[in-house]
Amino acid sequence: MVIQNGIAMFLTFLTIRVIPIPLYWSHAVSVRSNPGYDDIGYLKPILFVPGVVLDSLNIFWFYKIARGVLKGLFGER
């Protein structure tokens, strides 16, 4: 049961948190070509800095989850 829960968590995290990362960034970069983007001034970093931080955390935790699943499936290395 624990292994199945780990696999389900891995697949859910992959689907909800990791796969959308390129989609988000392609949209965020396309916003830069919007004429209104230049009008927001000092708020520009707010569009990108939190995304970089949160995506870095998502990738870090995905790595930890993947290692845990592999450890559960194939044992200690």
Image: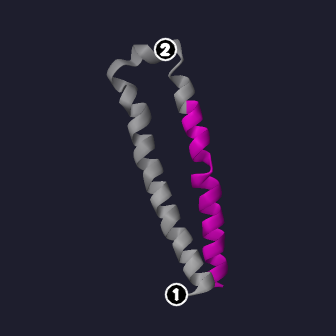
Numbered tag placed on residue 66 in the rendering: none
SS of the residue under disc 1: loop
> Residue placed farthest to the front in the image?
77
SS of the residue under disc 2: helix
Kindly check if marks 1 and 2 are in contact, taking CB atoms under 8 A apart as contact. Answer: no
* 2 inside magenta stretch: yes
Please say which color scheme the image uses.
one colour
Q: Earlier in the sequence, mark 1 or mark 2?
A: 2
Residue type at numbered disc 1: Glu
Disc 1 from disc 2: Cα separation: 54 Å
Q: Position of residue 52 (x, y in %)?
A: 43, 43
Please state if 24 lies on the left or on the right of 50 as rendered. right
Residue range highlighted in magenta: 1-27
Counting labels gives 2
Residue 16 visible:
yes
Residue type at numbered disc 2: Gly
Q: Position of residue 1 (x, y in %)?
A: 66, 85
Q: Position of residue 61 (x, y in %)?
A: 47, 63
Q: Residue at x 43, y 32 (%)?
A: 47
Query: Does 17 sit above or below residue 76?
Result: above
Secondary structure, magenta segment, majority class: helix
Mark 1: few, some, or many residues within 10 Å (few <14, many ≥20)? few
* 42 inside magenta stretch: no
Numbered tag placed on residue 36 in the rendering: 2
Residue under label 1: 76
Please name which of the two marks, 1 or 2, marks the residue nearer to the observer.
Answer: 1
Q: Residue at x 64, y 62 (%)?
A: 12
